[in-house]
Amino acid sequence: MTLSEFDSFRPTEPARRRREGGKRGTGRRRENGDGSREMPMVPEPEFTSYYGRPVVKPAPWGDDVAIYLFLGGVAGGSALLAAGSQLSGRPLLRRNARLGALGAVGLGAAALIKDLGRPERFLNMLRTFKVTSPMSVGSWILSAFSAGAAVAAVAEIDRMSGERLPLGPLRGVLRAVEGPAGLEAAVFAGPLAAYTAVLLGDTATPTWNEMHGELPFVFVSSASLASAGLAMVTTPVREAGPARNLALLGVVGDVVAMKIMERRMDPVAAEPLHQGKAGSLLKWSERLVLAGGLGTLLGGRNRAVAAASGLALLAGSALTRFGVFEAGLASAKDPRYTIEPQKRRLAARRAAGVTGDAITTGS
């Protein structure tokens, strides 16, 4: 049938070859490899994000925040040691721990404000108190802790200087309130060491979010290591017994909490803890923590061994915080760490019979 005036110029089509015997076919379809007659018309879907871009926005935090995570732990643990030595009559350990707490929280606050860009941004966070916001609660914890730690440390500095600080009539007030101030700082020490873990776990960053159940225990153990290590470096061994005990508890807690956390996490979300920069940091952290713990246990009463063990514990604690921080940033950059754990959680919910909610139905 001619449909166009140009059809007459087209070459003729070759005749179709017919099968031998003149049969058009047996009427049977080609079977699939698994024995079924159905052939997949669409290939299996393979996840790719939009031009390979991250699914979640990486946290806009730099190394200043990682430094704050570490120094907050040092400050909290040191305040606890200072309170214990205050109650048990160890003046050198009390003095060094109080000064350590003030120095760590001061440097940590400076790093935090540097990351924020302007000091008034930190003050703006104190205008409100939201119990559902780890950042808001953490700002108030940091402020309350800093007030008590500062009063206790200034009292120590005044004694060290031979009461030469220009305090005037406030010196008597300072002597009266330094004890309660040190205990007040100790009350907020644990929350200061742990709230940053809650803050990381509350984000959408895949690895941090997967850690939310155990990360506070890791950070508290890490804080114990760091503060005990600092006290073992700065305090004579005759008064550093509580620091050695805290160090050994911190070693056990750090190693056990990390292992439990990694075992509970989704295997894909836990990969950044073992790969790249974060993997190297955490591997060296474990080595230093174990070495510091062994040195504390076997030679903690020797001044040189105690100082070396304390430095190892301090470094191990710092590498733990930096390793966790780097692992979270790495997981946010690869969409695989977001999608694959989500798909596994969805399949687990459906397998458990949860099929009527918005998550499993997608409606």
Image (spheres, rainbow, N blue to C red):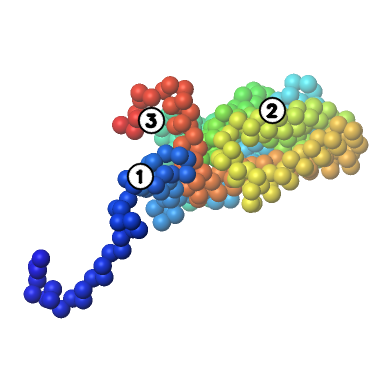
Query: The C terminus is located in which quarter?
Result: top left
Judging by the rendered image, the residue that carries numbered circle 2 is 80
Which residue lies at the image location 26% right of the left edge and 67% below the top edge? 15
- Horizontal and vertical percent for residue 200? 53, 38
Q: Amino acid at mark 1?
A: Arg
How far separated are the C-alphas under marks 3 and 2? 44 Å
What label sits on residue 99 in the rendered view? Answer: none
Label 1 vs 3, first from the N-terminus: 1
Residues tagged 1 and 3 counted as in contact (Cβ below 8 A): no
Q: Which residue is mark 3?
A: 359
Q: Residues within 10 Å of mark 3 (few under 14, many from 20)?
A: few
Task: Name the residue that disc number 1 marks.
Answer: 28
At 88% from the left and 30% from the top, the residue drawn is: 238
The front one of 196 and 336 is: 336
Secondary structure beneath disc 3?
helix
Q: Is residue 362 left or right of residue 293?
A: left
- On the rendered image, what quadrant is the N terminus found in? bottom left
Q: Nearer the viewer, mark 1 or mark 2?
A: 1
Q: Quadrant of residue 143?
A: top right
- Kindly identify the residue that appears in the image at 55 percent across and 49 percent down: 330
SS label for mark 2: helix
Q: Which amino acid, mark 2?
A: Leu
